[in-house]
Each structure stands twice: as structure tokens, then as C-alpha cells.
Amino acid sequence: GTVLVANDRECVTECPTGLYNVSGVCENCTISCENGGTLVSDPNTCECQCGTVYNGSDCSGCKCENGGTCGGNSEQCDCPSDYSGVFCETCSKECQNGGTLNSGDCSCMCP
């Protein structure tokens, strides 16, 4: 059940052990965390703590950019060969024969 407690002029919902405050109502938390996410151990929330590259309430979303994928490592994306960084946000292509890097689309322009 829901317990309303007067807390300095306002009523707040406090839930008994094992239940979570979901929009002001005490309920069982039914979220299943994916991709190594863990359930936040706070009686006032029912959400997952996700690794660096995952997002969403259940950690099912992937924050990788530029064609990167969320693989087995929750702290770094698997990046295509021309990109690097935690989220594949950096173009790391090296242009040959005096070409110049266009970092906007990660392509080389010939001289």
C-alpha cells in the first residue's frame, strides 16, 4: 500500500520495503534491465542504471554514433575503422598523398 507522510508542508509517498514509488503509487518494480544494467536500489525509483553506451529505462537503447554498435562492452562502442572514441564520435581517418580531412563527413579531399 501507499503511505503518505507529511514532510514539511507537503505529502510525499513512502513505500514499504520491496515496493517502488511509480508516479506516486507504490508498486512492484517490473523493469528488467538489459545489457548488464542494474536496478537502482532506491525505493523512490524503478529504473535501471545503464553502462556508458546504453540508455533507456531498461538499458536497451544504444548511444553509439557513425555506424558504431553496442557490443559486449558496455563502456565503449565497437566503431567502424574510420572512427574512434567512446561513442565513435571522432573521425580518426588518416588521409594519404597530401589529402585533407573533411571531418564533417570523415572523408579525404584530394589536393
Image (cartoon, helix red, strand yellow):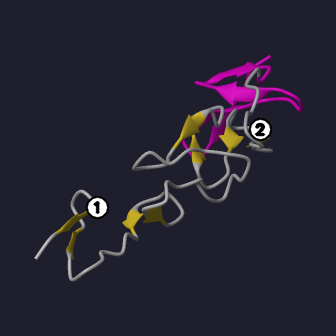
Magenta residues?
1-29
Identity of the residue drawn at 67% across and 36% down: 47
Any magenta on residue 8?
yes
Q: In this view, does 23 lie above or below 87?
A: above
Q: Say above or below: 100 vs 56.
A: below
Pick the quarter of the image with the N terminus. top right
Locate residue 67: give its quadrant. top left
Q: Nearer the viewer, residue 48 or 82?
A: 82
- Which quadrant is the C terminus positioned in? bottom left
Q: Nearer the viewer, residue 90 or 96?
A: 96
Label 1 sits on residue: 106
**Front in this rendered view, residue 3 or 67:** 67
Does residue 90 appear to the left or right of 64 in the view shown?
left
Residue carrying label 2 = 43
Determine the residue located farthest toward the left in the rendered image. Answer: 111
**Tag nearer the camera, 2 or 1:** 1
Q: Do the numbered discs 2 and 1 sit on residues whose CB atoms are within 8 Å? A: no
For the residues labelled 2 and 1, the Cα–Cα distance comes to 46 Å
Q: Residue 87's x, y, as percent?
A: 49, 57
Helix, strand, or loop for circle 1?
loop
Q: Residues within 10 Å of mark 1 (few under 14, many from 20)?
A: some
Outermost residue toward the right in this view = 17
Quadrant hosting residue 71: top right
Q: Residue 24 carries which label?
A: none
Q: Position of residue 26 (x, y in %)?
A: 73, 21
Report the number of numbered marks: 2
Q: What residue type is labelled 2?
A: Pro
Q: Earlier in the sequence, mark 2 or mark 1?
A: 2
